[in-house]
Image: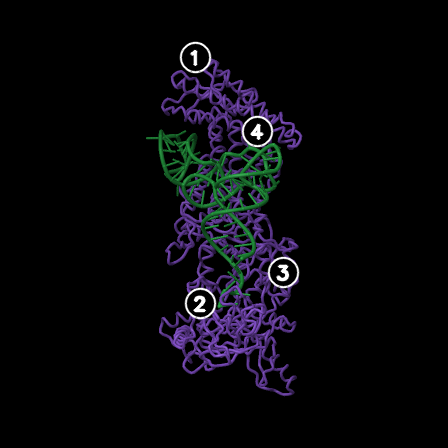
Amino acid sequence: MLEKTFDPKTVEPRLYATWEASGVFAPRDDPGAEPFSIVIPPPNVTGSLHIGHALQYTLQDVLTRFQRMRGKAALWLPGTDHAGIATQMMVERQLAESGNIGRREMGRDAFIEKVWEWKGRYGGTIARQARRLGASCDWSRERFTLDDGLSAAVRKVFVALHKQGLIYRAKRLVNWQPELQTAVSDLEVVNLEVNGSMWRIRYPIEGEPGRFIVVATTRPETMLGDSAVAVHPTDERYQDLIGREVRLPLADRLIPIIADEHADPEKGTGAVKITPAHDFNDFRVGQRHGLPLINVLTPDAKINDTAPEKYRGMDRFAARKAIVADLEEVGLLEGVDANKMMIPYDEKSKLVVIEPYLTDQWWVDAATLAGPAIAAVEQGRTVFQPAVWEKTYFEWMRNIEPWCVSRQVWWGHRIPAWFGPDGTTFVEETEDEAKAVARAHYGKDEPLIQDEDVLDTWFSSGLWAFSTLGWPDDTRDLARFYPTSVLVTGFDIIFFWVARMMMLSLHFLGDVPFRKVVMTALIRDEHGQKMSKTKGNVVDPLELVDEYGADALRFTMAALSGQVRNINLSRQRIEGYRNFGTKLWNAARFCQMNGCARVDGFDPAAVTHVQNRWIRGETAKTCAVVTEALEAARADEAADALYRFVWNVFCDWRLEFAKPLLAGDDAAAAAETRAMTAWVLDQVLALLHPIMPFMTEELWEATGREGPPRDSMLITAPWPDLPASFIDEAASAEMELVIAAISEGRSIRSELNVPPSARPPLLVTEAGPRERRVLEANAESIRQLLRVSGLRFDAADASAVPFAARGAALALPVAEFIDLAAERARLSKEVAALATDIQRTSAKLNNPDFVARAPEEVVDENRERLAEAEASKARLEAALKRLEAVG
RNA sequence: GGGCGGCUAGCUCAGCUGGUCAGAGCGCCUGGUUUACACCCAGGAGGUCGGGGGUUCGAACCCCUCGCCGCCCACCA
């Protein structure tokens, strides 16, 4: 006997351990099996499971389990990302907290050893947590971006791109994170609006004492590095000044006034200071005019030694204050205005202001790689779901900038570049190869120094789709599982990751990395607020698993996964789906208590009772919907269809109808109903398994104890393949009417507010010929049902006072139960409603435009509707007349 | 500045290519000890589908416009 409720806490760990130990997570080794593969978006090794992972992992697991059951060689490949900067910072912080010496004092090798230690200790956290969700990853294939194999792939890709001219080293302005003292990419910078100031500064015109040109700036400290002042070539105010010089205040240097389109006469004063080493626009202006690049900052954003002595060593913001004060003192500050502006911050901390800074870095020619990546999506070789994200992807790809891939941190893939004594660079996969090439170059051995930098962490994750499968080796996995089938990830990393994978995979494998990208929404709290620690509204998926069970959380994630941008998650929602699980559990208990066990050799195609033919068809319909939905990676649609079927069809009607049959005298019908019910439950378990693996597996095991033995666990059981011939249209039509009739009857009873003790007999007298036929055909079932519900059914009682309603007509013997006046009013209202319906419909049909232009089916529908309404109206009118006679 | 989304019952959301589309869950109200289930059962109330125009025989769905809300991108001195 099944327990009263499902206990996830004991069942889930047990089942997961059984699955994992039995090796079913690995793709089946049948060469004939069609491959299906997903690579996990690798979480940071330092990470732990958050609600967004729960959503993505649920989706990936649903698809993997579904395809596994469909007989495919299904692989869900797990792994983690070394997450260069993030991990390095975390370990540094941890070392500091435990009183260790700093990273720089420790030295590179010792520090990296510490990070590996950290990884060894905490790197498995998220994988353990994923298991609690039921993730059926093939853990034997787990990868880490710094694994030997993956690192080899990184070196090979880097070297190849370099030899192809698609990676180069160049001195350019980069986004510099002064606290970490590393370059970051454009994507790692976030512009935030702040209330700042704009200062107007007078630059004295050389040779014309008392005359100034006023420039406006939000960053006065950078004036120490000014190389020019620019005005628009057509700006009449400054025509005579073009070509002249100004004496740069404080720095006391002469710089030219130049004409450049960049200066916008509408903005500020129309004259703009040009600081090529500290501003991206100015850098371009400087290049156009051959201006010197004057860097005035140290790597940690203090004023350096090119500046006047007074400011040297000052922090950039302190220097700003000092410079403004000094300008004011010498009367060169014309004014200051409050100014709302966008300031670039470090994307992670949102605290550190990013500086444009002049350094040597390695760059990927993204524009060249983007071409094929754009074409692949245009041609539909990779499809985004939902498709709106394709626009975002195209927009970025078509305007892509060179990608700065070098980082001045230690934790990561060291750039495979070596410098010779004369600065010649040798880019090779190994030091030995570099030495060999250098020997050839110099004619003798020269000492080589490897580049200190590591690669952007997204460089290695950009190879994830193929490096994890063994590339550059010609592995069987690579041949079988590349391209992968689906990628499930958040829209927030379209640029960081999806786009880079597209570019790098297409370039090196010649094919897309995945056929479909499912973009998941951002999960917010129930009020639509972003989850954040400071707001205290973060929900921990593991807590939810503890409280409601993994299946409930999974069902919730699946059901909500259709949302494009935001998912507002509430506990009530999860409770609702937990209740759904309980409902299923109880349905299974009902089956068990009523002897609905599986029957050896049972053939669902051969059932004869209308209710069994009907539920067989409903099951087949649901199976088709669910299968199609999951094929399309629409877990939400599958969840929705299953919820409705299990609760609103199987439990609400099927099991209720089965009760009288099971208790009835017709032994054959009862036996058939038992077998059929068990069969339906079996199908339901299989269809639900991808979404609710634990409860379904548990029930599969429990229901397997009776009847023929199970061939396998549910996780590897075959997916139901129910033919369309299982749908019996006649049975469907009949049951639809029966259900409508019963619903109508319930409604009447309830509206009449009949106390349960009074239980009036419910009679059918005014049914039309069709309804009557159906009702009479099912008289036995209905009688049984009505008996259970305390109602009686009698098609022959002519003495009843008629009552009719839309759908099937039902009648009640009113006498003591019905308020005649109220019933009259009710009927009149019905009649009036039907009259307007008839009027509207006939007007429609009399409209020649409608008949001519509307589709035939629609016209037919309207004709039918008119006929039905007229018939109903006639019946109701007759009933009303009789009711009046009684009253 | 450019782009993209959203605005449908108290709440969170479905409504596919215009033709029963005005829906679901939760919440609320009424009733229920009918041995699967109160994590339940039955019933009910609630919306002029953000405003205004237009196209059409017909619009929540298409077009225009306005209004909020959100997100992404962008070098605005």
- First reached walking from the N terminus: tag 2 or tag 3: 2
User: Which comes before the other along the chain, label 4 or label 1?
Assistant: 4
Identified at 38% across, 76% down, the residue is A329
Q: Are marks 4 and 1 on the same chain?
A: yes
Between circles 2 and 4, the one closer to the viewer is 2
Mark 2 touches mark 4? (CB < 8 Å):
no
The numbered mark, 1 or 3, whose residue comes first in the sequence reads 3
Q: Position of residue A252 (x, y in %)?
A: 47, 81
Are callouts 2 and 3 both on one chain?
yes
- Chain A palette colour: purple
Q: Amino acid at mark 2?
A: Met
Q: Which residue is mark 3?
A: A373
Q: Is residue B49 left or right of residue A34?
A: left
Chain designation of label 4: A
Report the chain shown in green: B
CA distance separating discs 1 and 2: 90 Å
Amino acid type for the residue under numbered disc 1: Val
Q: Chain of mark 1?
A: A
| Residue corresponding to mark 2 | A198
Circle 4 residue: A733
Label whose residue precedes the other's in the sequence (1 or 2) = 2
- Callout 4: helix, strand or loop? helix
Looking at the rendered structure, which numbered label has been put on residue A5? none
**Pointer 1: residues within 10 angstroms few (<14), some, or many (20+)?**
few
